[in-house]
Image (cartoon, grey):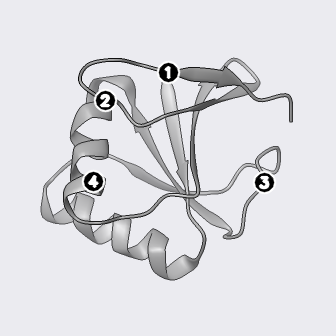
Amino acid sequence: MEYIATFGSTHKTLKAENVLKEKDIPFKLIPTPKKLAAFCDLAISYEDKDRTAVETAFRDNSVKTAAIYGKEGDEYVKVQFLRQGKRNSNKDSS
């Protein structure tokens, strides 16, 4: 599954980008999908295999996301940060 982290501003997105680059964690800087409510035109995409590393890096470096979505086909599912190995999700109808 692909995950997309959205942010409240370009500044926050670029901070997230720098943190992931410094830690050599794979990601893509992408335009925020139109289906997602966004305050910023940029988002960060990452794969399931990198999810723990990405979200831990965000948490450890005080990177604040607006939301994180998992992409299932053409649908986006809003998800929570991983906590103690648990995955929580809620269907997003947008």
User: Which residue occupies 57% across, 22% down?
Assistant: 89
Disc 4 packing (10 Å; few <14; some 14–19; many ≥20): few
Q: Secondary structure at mark 3?
A: loop
Disc 3 packing (10 Å; few <14; some 14–19; many ≥20): few
Q: Quadrant of the C terminus?
A: top right
Name the residue type under label 3: Ala
Identify the residue position indicated by label 1 in the image. 88
Viewer-proximal residue, 64 or 33? 64
Numbered mark located on residue 59 in the image: 4
Disc 1 packing (10 Å; few <14; some 14–19; many ≥20): few
Name the residue type under label 1: Asn
Identify the residue position indicated by label 2 in the image. 83
Name the residue type under label 2: Arg
Q: Residue furthest left?
A: 23
Q: CA distance from mark 3 to mark 1?
A: 20 Å
| Comes first in the chain, label 3 or label 1 | 3
Spot occupied by residue 62 in the image (x, y as percentages of width and height): 29, 66
Write down the quadrant of residue 66 in the picture.
Answer: bottom right
- Horizontal side of 31 relative to 54 (left or right) equals right
Spot occupied by residue 13 in the image (x, y as percentages of width and height): 47, 69
| Comes first in the chain, label 4 or label 3 | 3
- Horizontal side of 8 relative to 56 (left or right) equals right
Can residue 26 be seen at all in this image of the molecule? no
Numbered mark located on residue 37 in the image: 3
Can residue 57 be seen at all in this image of the molecule? yes
Q: CA distance from mark 4 to mark 3?
A: 22 Å
Disc 2 packing (10 Å; few <14; some 14–19; many ≥20): few
Whether tag 4 and tag 2 are in contact, CB under 8 A, the answer is no
| Comes first in the chain, label 1 or label 4 | 4
Q: CA distance from mark 1 to mark 4?
A: 17 Å
